[in-house]
Amino acid sequence: MCALALMLPASAIPADAPRNRFDVVVVDAGHGGEDDGARGASGLLEKRVVLDVAQRLARRLRAQGLKVVLTRDSDDFVPLETRTSVANDARGDLFISIHANSSRSPKPRGMEAYFVSLEASDAGSHEVAERENRALGATAPASLKLDPLSAILGDMAVNEHVRESNEFAKRAQAELAAIDSVPSRGVKQAPFVVLMGVRMPAALLEIGFLSNRKDEKALRARDRRDAIADAVTRAVLAFRDDYDRRRGVASAAGADAR
Ligand SMILES: [Zn+2]
């Protein structure tokens, strides 16, 4: 489906809305089509659960008056460059990539929020980025050429995006941790290529470990998927209010109250 067809009609946004007001969220469901992503111990596929959670999240954000663009809305393989170009063409204010985790050990559980950086914050984060990047057919982080990347990260707008990405990741992680029965795994940094190509604040959420039976069982349930979508929605709305305040525009919530 054309990405534009997934957006709310323009009438949902005040006609006089300044261009820099927070109003477009790009929701990226990881994997799809021939790329299953991680496979749970009892067979749950990452591509299925993340699409369902992405669609639940999109419905909630639209109900709040935000425009939402999904990088995929069906079980299709979407190349990396399409994901990033859809996001950039939509002039997104926030990019949220949704994934489910997997580990060689069946023990790790819980959710993680990532924002992009050149260096992984720990060995585990490095592994997660390697796995997710590999699925996209992207160059492994270890062999990424540093020059263009340093140039990108040296850009002032991008530095601001990194700061805001960190802020959103923190909010999302706090909201997600509040619904989880296991301790928060924290906000981490890693070189995810899907986050590097987008010109907006961006975070990648790992919504649980499919390699852990308890997490996988939880992720099969509709109420857990709803709880995740609710948690991320709260984080987006809080981020929107801060984002608009920093730019000196009334938030959409304020505009609705006129
Ligand atoms: Zn993934």
Image (cartoon, grey):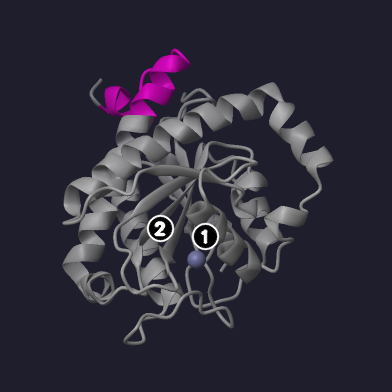
10 Å neighbourhood of mark 2: few (<14), some, or many (≥20)? many
Q: Which image quadrant is residue 1 in?
A: bottom right
Question: Residue at position x 56%, y 30% from top?
Answer: 161
Q: Circle 1 is placed at which residue position?
A: 128
Which residue matches tag 2?
206
- Mark 1 and mark 2: Cα distance apart in space: 9 Å
Magenta residues, dominant SS class: helix
The amino acid sitting under disc 1 is: Val
Foreground disc of the pair 1, 2: 1
Foreground residue, 207 or 78? Answer: 207
Q: Secondary structure at mark 2?
A: strand
Asked whether residue 64 appears in the rendered view, the answer is: no
Q: Residue furthest top?
A: 248
- Name which residue type carries label 2: Glu
Viewport quadrant of the C terminus: top left
For residue 226, above or below residue 219: above
Q: Give the residues in magenta.
A: 240-256
Q: Position of residue 84 (x, y in %)?
A: 65, 52
| The stretch drawn in magenta includes residue 54 | no
Is the CB atom of the residue marked by disc 2 within 8 angstroms of ligand 1's nearest atom? Answer: yes
Image marks 1 and 2: residues in contact by CB distance under 8 Å = yes
Q: Quadrant of residue 139?
A: bottom right
